[in-house]
Image (spheres, grey):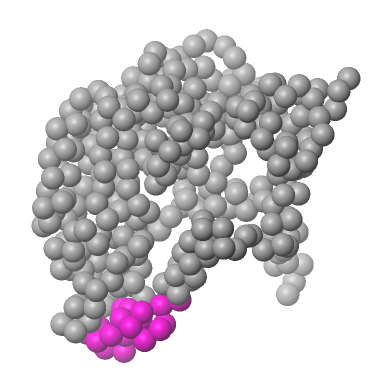
């Protein structure tokens, strides 16, 4: 290995911040074929027909929309459908991944900044809100928003105004906002982690996406669509035997349509002929399914209090959280109310965290 190919230090010993940046980048550069167009929405099932009726009813309005559904259920595709059938269809569709990204970076991405706000830059930077002007802004996984970000979004929805970072002139916004969440936002409201005003605002037009296990009538058309695209991209015609196809109906598809897509691509790659006779999961080769089952089992045991986080991982997580809280307190002169605002949580939540981690607040 030459010195030019040596991995960087952060790649060998990734910090939590580096891992977060990598996840955010992966979200932005997700495989092109995982973005399905509006024209390929499969609606053979009654569940999807009802969903599309709601899309056509909600899309022409100016109301913000909340898409609720499990991972891989197609929230991205439905958001694009709402844009395509809306008054804003002539404008751009701008997606922002809200998970795995810090508050500071998310604010910069959304609101942009004035000249000189970022070191070494002398030009103002347009945020995604400005880029989505007259179009649709799609906020993926709004459940990851801090309370500070929620308050800023609420202002945009109520007043259609925002301010770039660094101060300056208040900007007007005429975008349509579509939000998505895998989390239960109502539960977050009860926990004090989501603003009730914002929840009521985006829940006016709410669409629940059905899981794939509840729309199995769509399986044949989905399989045909994925195989057609696989042939187009790889130059190889693939089909599936009746026995293998029947196995698709017995799976619960916890990862939904995205899970089906990955399963079929994996099967196509492993298949020695152009007809898939057996799916990888049928003979234990589908590693992702095994991992997901282990993760779900661990999650259930933790939820029931039967097991706790392992000592090494648990202590590392505690140390990281303790350091984060202490740094925020020191930055805010050990004023708890100020530190809570800085962290995007309530003073009550901060007090609970300090008590749990046994952090003694300094008094001056």
Left or right for 222, reference 179: left
Picture quarter containing residue 86? top left
Q: Is residue 17 above or below residue 300?
A: above
Question: How many numbered callouts?
Answer: 0
Residue ranking furthest to the bottom = 272
> 204 or 14: which is nearer to us?
204
Residue at the right extreme, as displayed = 364
**Residue 266 vertical placement versus 130 (above, below):** below
Residue range (magenta): 267-287
Place of residue 71 in the rendered image (x, y in percent of width and height, measured from the top left): 37, 54
Where, by quadrant of the figure, is residue 233 drawn?
A: bottom left
The N terminus lies in quadrant: bottom right
Left-right relation of 79 to 187? left
In the displayed structure image, the side of residue 211 where residue 328 appears, left or right: right
Determine the image quadrant of residue 44: bottom left
Residue 340: give x, y in percent of width and height.
66, 27
Q: Residue at x 36, y 75 (%)?
A: 266
Residue 194 is covered by the magenta coloring: no
The C terminus: image quadrant:
top right
In the foreground, 168 or 27: 27
Q: Residue at 33% across / 79% down in the picture?
A: 267
Q: Is residue 96 visible?
A: no
Q: Residue at x 47, y 17 (%)?
A: 162
């Amino acid at each position: 290995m030459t010195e030019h190919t040596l991995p960087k230090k952060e790649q060998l010993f990734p910090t939590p911040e580096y891992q977060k940046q990598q996840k955010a980048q992966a979200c932005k550069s997700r495989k092109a074929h995982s973005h399905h167009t509006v024209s390929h929405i499969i609606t053979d099932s009654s569940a999807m027909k009802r969903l599309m009726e709601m899309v056509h009813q909600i899309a022409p309005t100016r109301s913000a929309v909340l898409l609720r559904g499990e991972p891989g259920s197609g929230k991205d595709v439905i958001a694009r459908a709402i844009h395509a059938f809306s008054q804003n269809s002539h404008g751009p569709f701008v997606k922002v991944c809200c998970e795995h990204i810090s508050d500071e970076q998310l604010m910069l991405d959304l609101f942009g900044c004035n000249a000189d706000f970022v070191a070494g830059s002398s030009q103002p930077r347009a945020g995604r809100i400005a880029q989505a002007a007259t179009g649709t802004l799609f906020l993926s996984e709004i459940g990851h928003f801090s309370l500070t970000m929620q308050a800023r979004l609420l202002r945009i929805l109520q007043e259609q105004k925002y301010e770039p970072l660094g101060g300056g002139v208040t900007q007007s916004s005429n975008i349509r906002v579509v939000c998505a969440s895998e989390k239960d936002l109502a539960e977050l409201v009860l926990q004090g982690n989501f603003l009730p005003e914002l929840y009521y605002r985006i829940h006016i037009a709410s669409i629940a996406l059905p899981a794939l296990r509840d729309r199995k009538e769509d399986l044949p058309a989905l399989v045909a669509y994925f195989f057609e695209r696989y042939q187009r991209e790889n130059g190889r015609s693939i089909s599936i035997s009746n026995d293998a196809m029947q196995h698709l109906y017995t799976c619960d598809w916890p990862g939904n349509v995205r899970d089906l897509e990955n399963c079929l691509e994996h099967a196509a790659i492993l298949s020695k002929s152009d007809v898939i006779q057996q799916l990888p999961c049928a003979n234990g080769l589908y590693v992702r399914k095994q991992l997901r089952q282990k993760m779900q089992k661990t999650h259930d045991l933790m939820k029931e209090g039967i097991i706790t986080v392992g000592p090494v991982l648990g202590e590392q997580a505690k140390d990281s959280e303790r350091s984060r809280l202490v740094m925020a307190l020191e930055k805010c002169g050990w004023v708890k109310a100020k530190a809570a605002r800085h962290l995007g949580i309530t003073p009550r939540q901060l007090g609970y965290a300090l008590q749990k981690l046994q952090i003694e607040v300094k008094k001056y």
